[in-house]
Amino acid sequence: MAEAGLVALACAAAVFVLSPLWRPAPPPAQDAEREPLLAAHEAVYRALRDLDLDHETGKLTDGDYAALRAGYQAEAVAVLRRLDALAISERDASAGPEGAN
Amino acid sequence: MADLGRFALLAALVLALYAMAASILGARRRRPEIARSATHALIAVASLEAIAAAVLWAALAGRDYSFRYVVSHVRDAQPFIYNLTSFWGGMEGSLLLWALILSGYTLAALRSIGRTRPPLVPALTTVFGGISAFFLFMLAFVTSPFTTSPFPPADGRGMNPLLLNPWMAIHPPTLYLGFVGMTVPFAIVTAGLAAGSVDDAGVLLARRWMLWAWYCLTMGLMFGAKWSYVVLGWGGYWAWDPVENAALMPWLVATAFLHSVMIQERRQMLTRWNVVLVILAFGLSIFGTFLTRSGVLSSIHSFTESSLGAFFLGFLALALLAAFALAAWRWDELRGRHELDAAVSRESAFVLNNVLFLAVAFSVFLGTVFPIVSAALAGRAINVGPPFFDHIVVPFAFGILFLMGIGPAVAWRRASPDGLRRSLQAPAAAAVVVGLALLAGGMRAPGPVLAFALCVFVAATIAVEFAGGVRVRRAHRGEPPLRALVALVAHNRRRYGGYIVHLGILLLFCGITGSSVFASQRVVTLAPGQAATIERYRVRFDGLLQSTRGGALAITARLRVFEGAHDLGAFAARRNLYLTGDVTTDVALRSTPRDDLYVTLAGWTQTGRATLRLLVNPLVSWMWAGGALLTLGAVIAMIPEHRLVPRTAPAFRGAWSAGE
C-alpha cells in the first residue's frame, strides 16, 4: 500500500515535470528587452530627482547642477529613443502577419 | 512515514539534477519547452521538500521515537512548541530547512525574474538546481533526518536546554533566510554571466534580493545576540565566536554591495566590483555553514563534529571556482562606462566605505580561520580571541561611522565645497559640544568620547538631510511640516529608508559602546536578608527556593531591588539543573533606556547563602531599539517605489522633454 503511494507520487511528479515537453511553449514575454531599458530609465529618473534635491538643499553649485542635469537628460532621451524604437519594432512585428492576410 | 520522507528527498535530488541538465540542454538547443520542463522540475523539488518537511514535523509533533532525529531533539516533558522548533535544532533538520528555504526563494525568483527577464530563466534554473542538488545529496546520503531505529526508546533526550528559548526558536530560521537569501543575487549574477546578459539591470535586480537577505541576516544576528544575552548568563551578547563571525562576514560584504550598487545604478560603474561582492557574499554564507557543521572550530553555536565539512568545502570551492571563472570570461564586458567625476562626491565616500567594510570582513576572516591555519602550519591551533578583533575592528568602525556622517552631506557626482561646509557645520559643532560635555562630565577614555561624538555627528547630518528635504517640499508645495516629512519619506523611500537604517545602526553603536566600556560588575555572597549595592541599585537577597520546572531541579534566588528608596519589586535569578548534566540560567533582568540591571545566581551553600553576580550594563536597550528602527528603515526602503516609468510601451508621438 505504502509502495503504491510512493509510485503514485513519483508518477505525478514525472507527469508534471514532463508535461511542458508535449505542450507548445508560450511566446516569450515582450518585456524581455524592454525591462533593462525601463530599469535604466528609472535609474536616470531617480538620479535626476536626487540631483534636484541636492541642488535645492545647497549641495551643488548652479554650474555643476546645470551641467549634470543636461547629462542626465541626454541619457534619459537616449533611453527613451531606444524604448520608442523597440515599441515600433514590436508593433511592426505584431502587425506583420495581419498585413500579410 | 520515514520511507515517504526518504523517498521525497531522493526524488527531489533526481529532479534537481534533471533541472540542471534540462535547463542547459534547453538553452543550448534553443528548445524552450525543455527549459520549461526544467522549471517544472524545480517546482516539483519544492513540493517534495515540503512533503519531507511535513513528515519530519509530524514525527516531531507526534513524538515518534522511531526517528533517531526525534529521539535526539524531543522528549516527553519538553514543551510542544519546542518539539516543533527542534526541526532546526539539529544538523539534519537545519539542512532540510535550508533546502526548503532555498526552494521557496527559487520559486519566488523564477516567478519574478521570469516575468521581467525570461532569457535569464534557463541559466537561473541551472544554478538553483545545482545548489539544491548539493543540499539534497547531503540530506539523502550523508546526514538524513529520516534515519530510524528498529527499537525506539520510550522517551527522547530532548534539545539542549539552552536552546529552549523563544529567541532561539526564531534565530536560526531568520538567519537562514539571510544566508540562503544570498543565493538569489549569486544565482542572478552567475546566470547573467553564463547567459551573456551581464548588464547593469541584472546586477541591480540582485540588489533587491540582497537587501532582503541583508535585512534577514541583520535580524538573525540581533535575535542571536538577544538569546546570548538572556540565556547564557554572562551578561554579553557578542563574543567574536567563530560562528558569530561566520554570520558577520557575509553581512559586511552585503552591506558594502548595497552601497556600491547605488553607484552602478547611477553611473554604470563598478560592475566588476559588484559582481565580485555578490560572489563573495554567497561564498561566505556557505563558509559559515561549513564552520557550523564541520567541527573544525569549537563554538557554542556549532553542531557536533561531523564529516560534513569536507563536502561543504568541496562545494564552496566548486561554486567559487565556477563563478569566478564565469566572471573572468566576461571580464571585458563588465567594464564600467564612466569614471568618478570628482574626488569629493558621494560616490567617493561609498568607494571608501566599501574599502573599510571589506577590510573589516577580511580581518574577521583572518582572525576566524587563524586557528585552522596555525594548526595546519605550526601543528597547534592558536586562537586570537576578542582583543584581536576589538583592536582591528574598532578603528575601522570609527572610519565607517565617520563616512556615514559625511555621505548624506555630499552630493552625487560633484560636491560643492561651500555646500559641504554648510551641511557639516552644525553636525560638527554638535559633535564637538557633546564631546566636550562628556569630557567635562568626567568621561576620560578617548574611545567612547569619540564614539558618542561621532554618533551625534552622524545623527545631526541625517537630521539636517531630513530638514533640508522638508524645507524643499514646503517651499514647493506649502505642506505643513509633518505632512511634508511623511511625503518626503514616502516619495524617496530608498534614500530616507536608508537614513532611518543608519539611525538604527547609530543606536546599536551607542548600545555596544555603552555596554562594553561602562559595564560594572560585582560578585557577592549574601545571607538571606543581606543586600549588595551596584551603581544606583541595591539588591536584597530574600532566600533560596528549590522546585522542579520542566523536568529540571530549579534553584531560585528571591531578590528585591531598590533604586534609592524606591522599591522596584521582586526579581528571581535561577539555575536549572537537568538530569542530563545540563545547567541553564534564568537571569533577573531590569531593563531601562539608561541601563540594565542583570543578576545571575552563580552558586549557593547548604546554609542558604547565595553567590550572586551583579552587572549594570548601560545602554543595552538602545541596541534592541536600534534593531527595531533598522527594521522600520529597511521595510521603508524595501517597499517598491511607484514605478517611475510606465511599464507599457511609450507613446509613439513623442519621446521626452524636460517639460513633460
Image (spheres, coloured by chain):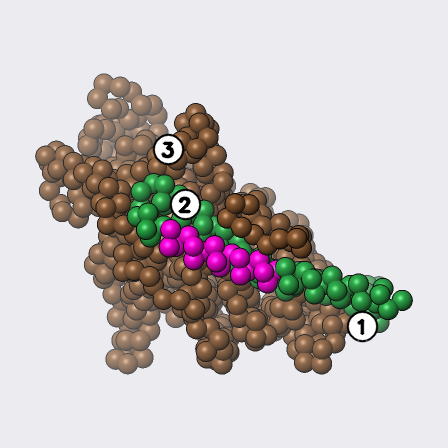
Chain colours: A green, B brown
- Chain letter, disc 1 residue: A
Is residue B12 visible in the rendered image? The answer is yes
The answer to the question of whether label 3 and label 2 lie on touching residues, with beta carbons closer than 8 A, is: no
Q: Nearer the viewer, residue A21 or B413?
A: B413
Near-viewer residue (B620 or B482): B482
- Which residue is pictured at 46% across the width and 78% down the height? B332
Label 1 – label 2 distance at C-alpha: 53 Å
Q: Nearer the viewer, mark 1 or mark 2?
A: 2
Cα separation between marks 3 and 2: 13 Å
Q: Position of residue B143 (x, y in %)?
A: 57, 69
- Label 3 and label 1 in one chain: no
Residue B605 at x, y percent in the picture: 27, 39
Q: Secondary structure at mark 2?
A: helix
Please indicate whether residue B594 sits to the left or right of residue B184 in the image.
Answer: left
Q: How many marks?
A: 3
Which chain is mark 2 on?
A
- Tag 3: amino acid: Arg
**Both marks 1 and 2 on one chain:** yes
Contact, mark 3 vs mark 1 (Cβ under 8 Å): no
Location of residue B602 with respect to B372 vertically, above or below: above
B381 or A24: which is nearer to us?
A: A24
Report x, y in % for residue A86: 65, 63
The region drawn magenta spans A66-83
Amino acid type of the residue tagged 2 in the rendering: Asp
Secondary structure mostly taken by the magenta-highlighted segment of the chain: helix
Outermost residue toward the right in this view = A101
Which of the labelled discs sits on residue B471, or is there none? 3
- Residue A52 is marked as 2
In which quadrant will I find the N terminus of chain B? bottom right
Label 1 residue SS: helix
Check disc 1 and report the residue beneath it: A21
